[in-house]
Amino acid sequence: MKILTVKKLLIPAILATLASGCAELQKPQSLLDAEKAYSQAANSASVLKYATPELNTAKKTLMSAEASENKEDMASLAYIANAQIETALSKAEAQQAHQHTKDLMAQKEQLIVSAIDAKKARAQNKLATMQQRVVSMEESRAEEEILLAFGNIEFVTGTADLVPGAVSGIDLLAEYMIAHPTKTIVLSGHTDNSGSAELNMELSQRRADFIRDVLVSKGIAAERITAIGYGQSQPIVPNNTREGRQRNRRIEIKFAN
């Protein structure tokens, strides 16, 4: 009976001693250092982006170290975890450097493309400018021909009727305006000083209106044409000769875009 009593007393004491020994088991400095290194790595954006699998492996190793029953195993696993963390850091650094190089190359390629595009744009602008100059020169020559043709337009004295054969200039003008749909014109009617100024003002307006109506009949929109009569107020030569009066009976054209 005494022997059983002693055993009953010893068993709790042994268990308490073992529990106390386990409670006193502290993490070695190597494990604390590995946990600190892991915490720093886990807060690194580059590691999370490029080396998450390696970091997770290190975390599992640290968990195993924390669950170890002796310091030797803790230290050994801490060493392994630390090496795994270093691997994650090295991979993240290498991947980040590689990505930085790729970004620089992409920027360089973009600069090259931009430079080529800018060069093309300059060349295209230069070509467009040259083409516009050619078009402008062609338009100027065409307008000069129209002005010359209109210089030959004659009206029957005292009327808004054209003399026979005087419509070629109008046909030329209509064709030009059809080919250049943004062009607008101002038609100015003028007379010599025969008759009263009031009648000549009316006559010059009727002559300008007549040319406008002919153009409209040929398909030119009326809003593209302005017709104004100036009567005898703007002679280009003296009216004291027959030839001078004939020249003053005229229709002038001004072109605009």
Image (cartoon, rainbow, N blue to C red):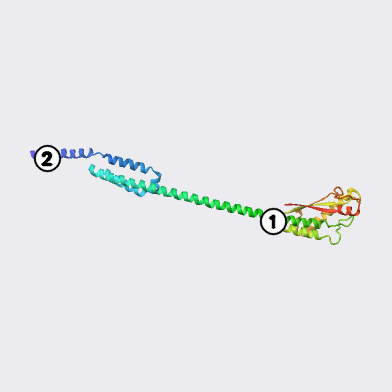
Across and down, in percent, residue 27 comes to 26, 40
| Image marks 2 and 1: residues in contact by CB distance under 8 Å | no
Q: Nearer the viewer, residue 101 or 199?
A: 101
Q: Which residue is mark 1?
A: 134
| Kind of residue sitting beneath label 1 | Val
Q: Nearer the viewer, residue 146 or 9?
A: 146
Residue 146 at x, y percent in the picture:
78, 57
Number of marks in picture = 2
Say which of 225 and 256 sits in front.
256
* Residue 43 in which image quadrant: top left
Q: To which quarter of the image does residue 123 belong?
A: bottom right
Residue shown at 31% from the left, 41% from the top? 35
Return the x and y of residue 47 as percentages of the image width and height: 38, 46
Sequence-wise first label, 2 or 1: 2
- 75 left or right of 195 in image: left
Q: Name the kind of residue labelled 2 in the image.
A: Lys
x 40%, y 49%: residue: 95
Question: Which residue does the numbered mark 2 point to in the structure image?
Answer: 7
Is 189 left, or right, of 142 in this rendering? right
Q: Dot 1 surroundings within 10 Å: few (below 14), some, or many (20 or more)?
A: few
- SS under mark 1: helix
